[in-house]
Image (tube, helix red, strand yellow):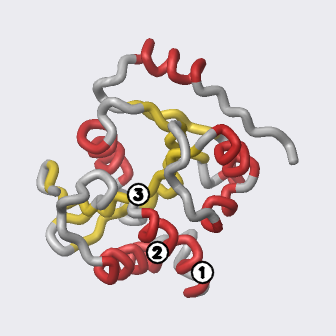
Amino acid sequence: MKFEDIDVISPALFPKEQWNEAEVLGAMTWLWLLSENCKHSTVSDMARRVLPVIKSRQFALFSQGSQPLGYISWANLDEQSEAEYVHSEPWIYSQQNWNCGDRMWLINWFAPLGQSALIKHLIEKHLFPEQCFRALYHKGAIRGLKVMTFHGKSVSKLETQDWIKQHPILATDH
């Protein structure tokens, strides 16, 4: 699928579009190697975090021409799974079912080339224009753990506030 001159591979959102697992793996690996936070990761660490994303089919890979720009992945969790994820972010990578509820979480937001604003725009306008969702801020070691809430362009601030009230984070200490 193409939006505003950006190619988007997203099997969950556009199931009729052709895509290739090896091509996606190659693009995601290349992006990892460009990331300051991830370029020194082992191949097995990268595989542990990238292969479940590809297998879940709940990702969007963004590229312009043949240049990968970044990717996101998401999971639709139930209350129990959400609590597990918030308590221990790596937990999600050991789970088979990334689609077990109505609480959408962005699992990865990977934009090592500085394209976060563009990706955010595409997410809110084209991929999830009518949804609210959350993400864990992954630089928690620097600034502390933070849950961020996002909403699509078609969702008003009042609707977002209602969604937040209807979907409280139920994470508990283990």
Where in the figure is residue 111, as x and y percent of width and height? 40, 60
Q: Which residue is mark 3?
A: 58
Compute the Cα span from label 1 to label 3. 23 Å
The secondary element bearing badge 3 is classed as loop
Q: Which mark is residue 41?
A: 1
On-image quarter of the N terminus: bottom left
Type of the residue with mark 2? Trp
Graded by Cα atoms within 10 Å as few (under 14), some (14 to 19) or many (20 or more), the crowding at tag 1 reads few
Quarter location, residue 89: bottom right
| Residue at (51, 17) in percent of width and height | 161
Where in the figure is residue 11, as x and y percent of width and height? 30, 61
Compute the Cα span from label 2 to label 1. 9 Å
| Residue at (46, 21) in percent of width and height | 160
Compute the Cα span from label 3 to label 2. 18 Å
State if disc 1 and disc 2 touch (CB < 8 Å). yes
Left-right relation of 42 to 26: right
The secondary element bearing badge 2 is classed as helix
| Nearest to N terminus: mark 3 or mark 2 | 2
Q: Which residue is mark 2?
A: 32
Type of the residue with mark 1? Ser
Foreground: disc 1 or disc 3: 3
| Residue at (38, 78) in percent of width and height | 25
Above or below 34: residue 13: above
| Nearest to N terminus: mark 2 or mark 1 | 2
The secondary element bearing badge 1 is classed as loop
Type of the residue with mark 3? Gln
- Quick check: can you spot residue 32? yes
Of 140 and 98, the residue lying toward us:
98
The residue sitting at the bottom extreme is 43
